[in-house]
Amino acid sequence: MGCWEEVIQNLISCGYLRSEKVIQAMRKIPRADFLPPEARPYACEDRPLPIGFGQTISAPHMYAIMLEAAQVQEGNKVLEVGAGSGYGAALLSFLAGKKGKVYSIEVVPQLAEFARKNIQKSKMHAVIIEGDGKQGYPEEAPYDRILVTAAAISLPAPLLLQLAEGGRMLAPIGGLFQELVLLEKTKSGILQRSLLPVLFVPLR
Ligand code: SAH
């Protein structure tokens, strides 16, 4: 058994990975393919790893938690804020399927390029946009799912506006102490709950 399959088995036995589709996504797309060469030997360690420019790729269990909570459906239009390595966007693209669409915004130009190359190599389809994710991407709004992968003190208002009714958003909120928050936009308003304490790089 390769080390990535061991990671998957661990995430399943810890209860982080539960749904067949998310398990398939992580199994099919190994994190190693989204790392710079010097970080690749550590790909199977369940912790964030540096991807350059002071940024990190999240720990495998964090992708599992976010993707399970996001409940991405085939055909969904998804927005990610913070493309980084492109790993999250590739997983989202697998989950949204051929009929779905994934947009991911990245503020560091070199990382936007890094993400694009990695996604292309993995044969997934996601559009990487260079820019400030706090503004969202109004051109393609509304989105069925929005995943924010950098932490803000409070949720940027444009993101909530660009969430479709019936949509789900996940975002780390806070400064020194952050929580991963799940927001659902329903007919009667916004449902919000905090899932767990987390630590993400700050949203710039
Ligand atoms: N989802 C990424 C995780 C990247 S870490 C992955 O799978 O690898 C968070 C990323 O958010 C970093 O790449 C950082 O440069 C980016 N970021 C920070 N502030 C941002 C902003 N205002 N707009 C867009 N991206 C931002």
Image: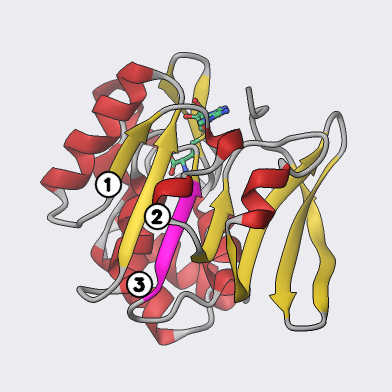
The residues tagged by marks 3 and 2 sit, at their Cα atoms, a distance apart of 19 Å
Answer yes or no: do the residues labelled 1 and 3 have beta carbons within 8 Å?
A: no
For the residue with label 3, is its CB less than 8 Å from the closest atom of ligand 1? no
Magenta region, residue range: 76-80
Q: Which mark is residue 95?
A: 3
200 relative to 17 in the view: left or right: right
Q: Is residue 79 in the magenta section?
A: yes
Secondary structure under the numbered disc 3 in the rendered image: helix
Write down the quadrant of residue 189 in the picture.
Answer: bottom right
**Mark nearer the viewer, 3 or 2:** 2
Secondary structure under the numbered disc 1 in the rendered image: strand
> Dot 1 corresponds to which residue?
127
Write down the quadrant of residue 164 in the picture.
Answer: bottom right
> Dot 2 corresponds to which residue?
140
Q: Local crowd at mark 2 within 10 Å, few (<14), some, or many (≥20)?
A: few
Residue 144 % position (x, y):
51, 70
